Image: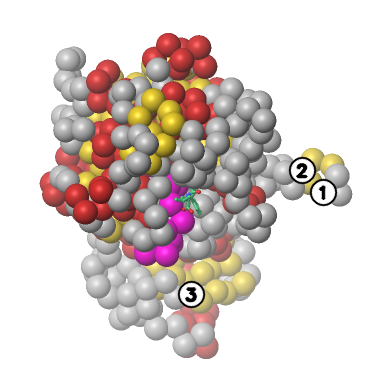
């Protein structure tokens, strides 16, 4: 992975080297540092604004290379518009700044602009935008067969009014950034490198942050009776794992919040095999588990005042002489029986046992599962929103709110007994597919049968976790979706 930027906070003074980013609103009025640089460069900044027809619109840019009269390599003006800036805007500005600084040795971002106060929180959000934008998954790119020479990370000074405050805020936000980047890394890794065992080792590594991590292996899962999960894994040479990550930052004895992740390291569809076109994307079918692992990394890293548990089911769905067949009936850990109509509807089988186990074992305040569960959610919501499904209006409202502030947005889809009926089976208690229509909803209804009375939300991230559109803060195939969203949900509603 490309080296992430080396970020430091300093007081606002005129930068003397590298490339500097200046922020300018629609009034086009320059802040004190910008004014000073404009004067020293014989009006280069004012002229550049005219020549580029720069209007200060949020996200617009104008660049000057090697301006005379100052020792800077370059100056880039970035527009901030005229409305009050939201958290998402600060992140975006950081991202846009990094696009300019990438590949350079040194740069700075000057947090000043007419009529805007950049507080510690906004300086830290800009740092987060810088870091998330800089991420690139190039582990397997060589230079003509030789490992790439690692360039030094770009050194970026964030020049701001409240340096101490920004450093304190960044200590927390940096941990959240690390969580999102961990999730991206896990999703981007190919399945030959990241199998159930290797993923479990990455989860285990969170112990270095003070989390407790337990790895369950096949005999443990057999003893527990997780036959639904094991049925999915049985066609693969690589044995399944379940990783349980615990962060105890809350009061002793306080019920935990629980996050459950689908970790299908590769989904061929099994005997109900998928078509070849695009199947390579199914290396990302562990996006839910990656988000849960990234979230636990974030919570532990920022020492969140909450008891949180992440549990992920790591399996590979393969066709094989030993693989599960359509028509097979499995008994889940809950005792409920499932007729497997389509072996490609495997994620819900994995989650069924994890949800039942979590509810019984952890007695949670709530459980939220994340899964790249259905292609149908892409049809319904595209890549812009994850689908959420729940009977809890309160949890849905909290998630929507967290989505709005972080930009990881969600949209609620319905549950109802009419949909539930669609998964009744002729031979068993239920079947694992509900027919052609409402595919994301019938999948959620299936999960609901295992969540029981516990407060629960299912988040379908099939459209948001992977194959993501490039944005100002992500240039990566894997977005890390869910980490910032759920970290924020916890921070705003379940801490302290
Ligand atoms: N992992 C897929 C869902 C998926 C599709 C994720 C596209 C990301 C992008 C899931 O296991 C699956 O195959 N679902 C089937 C369910 C069907 C067989 C009822 C689907 O969506 O077609
Ligand atoms: Mn599948
Ligand atoms: Zn799948």
Residue depicted at x 21% and y 33%: 452
Q: Position of residue 183 (x, y in %)?
A: 48, 40
User: Mark 3 packing: few (<14 Cα in 10 Å), some, or many (20+)?
Assistant: many
* Quadrant location of the N terminus in the rendered image: top right
Q: Residue at x 21, y 54 (%)?
A: 418
Instruction: Name the residue nearer the viewer: 220 or 433.
Output: 433
Whether residue 187 sits left or right of residue 256 in the image: it is right
Q: Quadrant of residue 331?
A: top left
Q: Dot 1: within a 10 Å radius of its alpha carbon, few (fewer than 14), some, or many (20 or more) residues?
A: few
Between disc 2 and disc 3, whose residue precedes? 3
What residue is rendered at 36% in x and 61% in y?
437
Position of 101 with respect to 131 (left or right) is right
Q: Of the numbered discs in the image, which one, if any, rests on residue 143?
A: 1
> Which residue in the protein does label 3 denote?
61
Disc 3 secondary structure class: strand
Residue 169 among magenta residues: no
Residue 57 visible to an observer of this rendering = yes
Q: Residues within 10 Å of mark 2 (few under 14, many from 20)?
A: few
Disc 1 and disc 3 in contact, CB within 8 angstroms: no
Q: CA distance from mark 1 to mark 2?
A: 8 Å
Q: Earlier in the sequence, mark 1 or mark 3?
A: 3
- Residue extent of the magenta highlight: 369-383
User: How far is the residue under mark 1 from the one under mark 3?
Assistant: 32 Å
Identify the residue under disc 2. 149
Percent coordinates x, y for residue 67 in the rendering: 59, 73
Q: In x, y percent, where is residue 165?
A: 28, 42
Q: Which residue appears farthest toward the front when viewing the image?
A: 426
* Discs 1/3, front: 1
- Alpha-carbon distance for marks 2 and 3? 31 Å
Question: 87 or 68, which is in the foreground?
Answer: 87
């Amino acid at each position: 992975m490309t080296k992430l930027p080396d970020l430091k906070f300093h007081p606002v003074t005129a930068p003397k080297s590298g490339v500097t980013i200046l922020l300018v609103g629609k009034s086009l009025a320059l802040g004190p540092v910008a004014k000073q640089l404009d004067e020293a460069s014989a009006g280069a900044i004012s002229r550049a604004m005219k020549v580029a027809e720069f209007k200060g619109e949020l996200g617009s840019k104008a660049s000057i290379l090697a301006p005379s009269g100052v020792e800077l390599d370059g100056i880039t003006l970035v527009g901030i518009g005229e409305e009050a800036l939201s958290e998402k805007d600060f992140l975006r500005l950081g991202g846009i700044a990094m696009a300019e600084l990438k590949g350079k040795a040194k740069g700075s971002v000057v947090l000043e602009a007419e009529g805007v106060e950049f507080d510690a929180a906004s300086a830290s959000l800009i740092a987060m935008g810088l870091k998330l934008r800089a991420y690139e998954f190039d582990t397997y790119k060589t230079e003509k067969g030789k490992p790439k020479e690692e360039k030094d990370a770009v050194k970026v000074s964030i020049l701001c009014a409240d340096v101490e405050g920004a450093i304190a805020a960044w200590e927390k936000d940096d941990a959240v950034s690390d969580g999102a980047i961990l999730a991206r890394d896990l999703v981007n890794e190919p399945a030959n490198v990241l199998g159930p065992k290797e993923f479990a080792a990455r989860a285990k590594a969170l112990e270095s942050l003070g989390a407790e991590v337990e790895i369950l292996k096949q005999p443990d899962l057999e003893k527990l009776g997780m036959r639904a999960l094991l049925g999915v894994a049985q066609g693969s040479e690589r044995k399944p794992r379940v990783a349980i990550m615990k962060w105890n930052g809350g009061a002793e004895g306080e019920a935990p919040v629980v996050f459950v992740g689908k970790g299908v390291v590769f989904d061929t569809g099994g005997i109900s095999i998928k078509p070849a076109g695009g199947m390579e994307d199914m290396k990302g079918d562990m996006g839910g588990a990656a988000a849960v692992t990234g979230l636990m990394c974030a919570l532990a890293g920022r020492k969140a005042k909450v008891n949180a548990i992440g549990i992920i089911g790591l399996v590979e769905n393969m066709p094989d002489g030993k693989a599960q067949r359509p028509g097979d009936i499995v008994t889940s850990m809950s005792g409920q029986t499932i007729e497997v109509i389509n072996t490609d509807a495997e994620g819900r089988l994995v989650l069924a046992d994890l949800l039942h186990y979590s509810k019984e074992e952890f007695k949670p305040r709530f459980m939220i599962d994340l899964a790249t569960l259905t292609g149908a959610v892409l049809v319904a919501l595209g890549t812009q929103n994850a689908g959420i499904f729940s009977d809890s209006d309160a949890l849905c409202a909290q998630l929507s709110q967290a989505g709005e502030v972080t930009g990881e947005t969600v949209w609620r889809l319905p549950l109802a007994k009419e949909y539930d009926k669609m998964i009744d089976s002729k031979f068993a208690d239920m079947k694992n597919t509900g027919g052609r229509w409402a595919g994301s909803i019938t999948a959620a209804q299936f999960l609901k049968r295992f969540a029981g009375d516990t407060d629960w939300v299912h988040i379908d991230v099939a459209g948001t976790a992977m194959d993501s559109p490039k944005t100002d803060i992500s240039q990566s195939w894997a977005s890390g979706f869910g980490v910032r969203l759920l970290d924020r949900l916890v921070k705003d509603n379940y801490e302290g």
